Image (cartoon, helix red, strand yellow):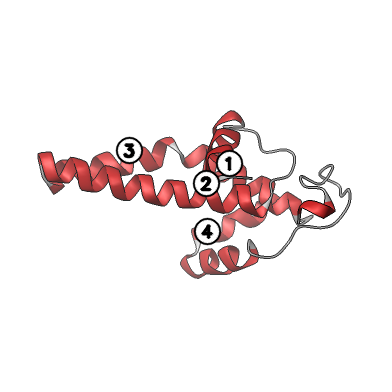
Amino acid sequence: MSFFEAIASCFGKYSTFTGRASRAEYWWFVLFTMLAWLIINALVSSFAGPEVGIPTAYVFLFLVLLPNLAVGARRLHDMNVSAWWLLLHLTGVGSIALYVWMLFPGSSGTNRFGEPVLDPEDL
């Protein structure tokens, strides 16, 4: 899955918490979110100052919060784990553990959350 396919997929499944998401889909969307936040912050801050740029960038993060949670839930489902583990983000250190966990491959074959996202030859 390419960068733009992942972004389109995540926005297409804006609030879909069921199913599975590949590592590529998850990490490309995380990269998009971080880059977009930095660009919005830099552009708006350069024209209107940081007192406008930083809140504007945080409004963007609020707008993509739901698709970020949804792709995170689908990524955990790909590893055959409950999406409730996303609550680890509420602790500070738990976020680090979750991001490391998201690096691992998903379960092979069908699991309780559905069919695999990629064929084995695509891995």
> Label 4 amino acid?
His
Image check: 29 left or right of 77? left
Q: CA distance from mark 4 to mark 2?
A: 17 Å
Indicate left or right for 111 with 36 as reference.
right
* Nearest to viewer (mark 4 / mark 3): 3
SS for callout 4 = helix
Of the residues under marks 4 and 3, which one precedes in the sequence? 3
Residue type (three-letter) at the residue carrying disc 1: Ala
Which of pointers 4 and 2 lies earlier in the amino acid sequence?
Answer: 2
Q: In the rendered view of the protein, which quadrant contains the C terminus?
A: bottom right
Mark 2 highlights which residue?
29
Q: Residues within 10 Å of mark 2 (few under 14, many from 20)?
A: many
Label 4: which residue? 89
Amino acid type shown at disc 2: Phe
Residue 6 got which mark?
A: 1
The secondary structure type at the circle numbered 2 is helix
Query: Residue 79: x and y, percent?
Result: 76, 57
Sequence-earlier tag: 4 or 1: 1
Give the residue at mark 3.
59
**Crowding near pointer 1: few (<14 within 10 Å), some, many (20+)?**
many
